[in-house]
Image (spheres, rainbow, N blue to C red):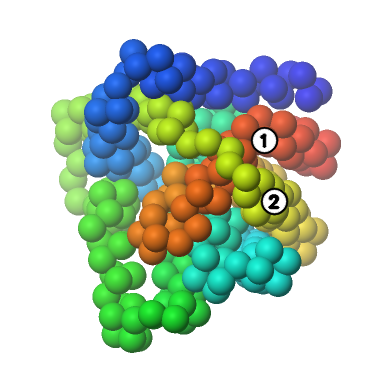
């Protein structure tokens, strides 16, 4: 079973490997990689999110138990990560929050969407988009607020609120989501000619994003802080999906597609946002970079194991 699942997942990582190798060999110089990621973040993935939300049955997808299950796991993993960084690794509070942010922010877009799509088809994608639609707001709200509360040079409540708002509404991904909600809820006409153009961009977005992500990961190295990176990777890849599974399946008894969406998305490695968050505060950057790289490598095995577990527990 694991072998068959790896065959499903491995193409995603092979595409990332193409980007990694192209960047390492300078076939794609750094500006080319930056260009791929700029297209992905500013145009491609916003079109993916807009296309998903504009036709989404919001009443069916936005299940409170689903969102509670996923984000309870994310926030619990983050809180435990902060405590472990402070108590076990003796890191300062601000560094602890920056490093532990990797346990909070799963790579739900660039890894989660293609892996779930290949493993299960379109079924779990509706609840998956529900999770993604509030992923950045929840994670940045929790991360920024916690950082400002614990760091010695923290901002006031008003300044913190402004920082959270800037992080949200200057983000092209959020703009794509908001526009999708506006068209969906407002029943605004969506001409076929525009739909066709947006869907063409969306179809190209995820493969380009995977190549670009591989190129970005080629810039990171596994440094001496493997203890911190390994700890956050374990919280992200094991604890978060475990909590999501227990809550969605055993506590709330949600439909199989909702369980799959929550658990597989929770089992994704921290995204590049984990490193960007650390860079924003200039704290824990080497550890955050190591975590992103290590966890992404481990996801090949851990995501396969979680999908195998779900296939055993849930009806096909």
In the shown orientation, is residue 259 left or right of residue 102? right
**Residue 101 image point, x, y percent:** 53, 60
Q: Residue 298 carries which label?
A: 1
Marks 1 and 2, Cα distance to the nearest angstrom? 15 Å
In the shown orientation, is residue 3 left or right of residue 8? right
> Residue visible at 30% across and 22% down?
29
**Residue 65 image point, x, y percent:** 62, 64
Q: Name the residue under label 2.
A: 227
Asked whether 293 or 164 is in front, the reply is 293
Q: Which of marks 1 and 2 is nearer the N terminus?
A: 2
Q: Quadrant of the N terminus?
A: top right
> Eyeballing the image, is 17 above or below 173?
above
> Residue visible at 50% across and 45% down?
289
> Residue visible at 28% across and 33% down?
34
Q: Which mark is residue 130?
A: none
Asked whether 43 or 156 is in front, the reply is 156
Q: Dot 1: few (<14), some (14–19), or many (≥20) neighbours within 10 Å?
A: some
**Residue 223 image point, x, y percent:** 58, 42
Q: Can residue 176 be seen in this view?
A: yes
Asked whether 220 or 5 is in front, the reply is 220
**Residue 231 image point, x, y percent:** 70, 53
Q: Dot 2: few (<14), some (14–19), or many (≥20) neighbours within 10 Å?
A: some
* Foreground label between 1 and 2: 2
> Residue visible at 42% across and 77% down?
148
Secondary structure at numbered mark 1: helix
């Amino acid at each position: 079973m694991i072998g068959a699942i790896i065959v499903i997942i491995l193409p995603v990582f092979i595409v990332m490997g193409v980007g990694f190798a192209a960047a390492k060999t300078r076939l794609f110089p750094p500006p080319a990689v930056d260009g791929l990621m700029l297209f992905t973040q500013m145009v491609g993935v916003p079109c993916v999110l807009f296309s998903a939300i504009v036709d989404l049955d919001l009443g069916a997808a936005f299940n409170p138990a689903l969102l509670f299950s996923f984000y309870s796991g994310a926030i619990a993993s983050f809180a435990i990560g902060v405590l472990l960084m402070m108590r076990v690794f003796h890191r300062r509070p601000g560094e602890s929050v920056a490093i532990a942010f990797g346990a909070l922010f799963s790579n739900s877009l660039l890894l989660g969407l293609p892996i779930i799509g290949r493993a299960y088809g379109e079924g779990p994608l509706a609840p998956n988009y529900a999770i993604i639609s509030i992923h950045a707001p929840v994670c940045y709200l929790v991360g920024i607020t916690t950082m400002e509360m614990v760091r010695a040079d923290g901002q006031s409540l008003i300044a913190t609120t402004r920082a959270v708002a800037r992080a949200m509404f200057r983000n092209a991904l959020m703009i794509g989501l908001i526009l999708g909600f506006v068209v969906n809820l407002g029943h605004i006409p969506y001409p076929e000619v525009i739909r066709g153009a947006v869907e063409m961009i969306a179809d190209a977005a995820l493969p380009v994003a995977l190549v670009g992500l591989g190129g970005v990961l080629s810039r990171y190295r596994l440094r001496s802080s493997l203890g911190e990176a390994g700890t956050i990777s374990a919280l992200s890849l094991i604890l978060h999906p475990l909590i999501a599974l227990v809550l969605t399946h055993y506590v709330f008894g949600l439909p199989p597609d909702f369980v799959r969406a929550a658990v597989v998305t929770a089992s994704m490695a921290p995204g590049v946002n984990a490193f960007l968050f650390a860079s924003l505060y200039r704290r824990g950057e080497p550890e955050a970079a190591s975590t992103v790289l290590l966890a992404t490598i481990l996801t090949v095995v851990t995501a396969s194991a979680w999908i195998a577990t779900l296939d055993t527990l849930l009806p096909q």
